[in-house]
Image (cartoon, rainbow, N blue to C red):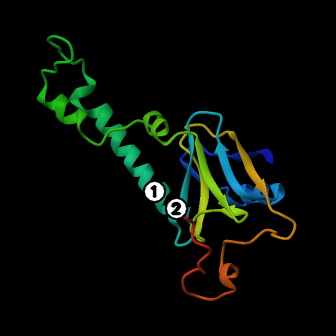
Amino acid sequence: MMIQKNFYVDTSPEIDVINVFHEVDSVIKESKVCQGLVTLMAPLEMASFVILDSRKDADKKFKEELTDFLKESEKIRVDSPASAPVKKRGIGRLHSLETLQILSGPKISKEMLMFFMGRTLTLPLSQGAMAMDPWDHVYLLDVGTEGRRREFFVQVIGEEANKDQGRMPLRGPAVRGGKKGPPPQGPSVKV
């Protein structure tokens, strides 16, 4: 079984950290897939997906720290002596100690950050839910400098639950009937 849906969110000229967990979960429920994969994809540059704890304002803290990091990084890149032309002798030989220090410093552009983070996120599905901590949520991260209507895709692929198996929740107290403690052990796998 495979299903794909697209969603839209409005972003601001600042860094946005937008909770998209419910959109993703709705596609998983609609698909009735029990075991498989869910993939999120943002087709335009300057967006990525992150998994954050949905409690304790983790999204706000993440946004603040990322904003501070990128501002400091931009300051290092623009205000540094390394932004001046670099003298070279031979291929790849730098003659400025300051340049070497700056190059090894904590500078990174938004474009480079998004390159390393990627525009997709794939998570396993187990028992009809994303296999992650019950308090974790998926967030769309947008670092673009212009507000826009941002599109993202959610694709679910996998095996549907048998009629007698049904969708078994993984999240919250219903996981083990409200009981605390380790989950019950299933049959062991022999190789």
Q: Is residue 85 above or below residue 53?
A: above
Q: Tell me whether circle 1 and circle 2 mark residues in contact (CB < 8 Å).
A: yes
User: Residue 148 appears at what percent x and percent y?
Assistant: 67, 39
Image position of 132 (left or right of 89):
right
Image position of 53 (left or right of 78):
right
Q: Is residue 123 above or below residue 70?
A: below
The dot on residue 189 is: none
Query: Quick one: 36 or 113, which is closer to the camera?
Result: 36
Element type at mark 1: helix
The dot on residue 60 is: 2
Q: Residue at x 74, y 71 (%)?
A: 168
Q: Which residue is mark 1?
A: 64
User: Residue 107 appears at what percent x and percent y?
Assistant: 32, 39
Callout 1: few (<14), some (14-19), or many (20+) C-alpha neighbours within 10 Å? few
Mark 1 vs mark 2, CA separation in Å: 6 Å
Question: Which amino acid, by three-letter code, is at mark 1?
Answer: Glu
Q: Residue at x 60, y 81 (%)?
A: 184
Element type at mark 2: helix
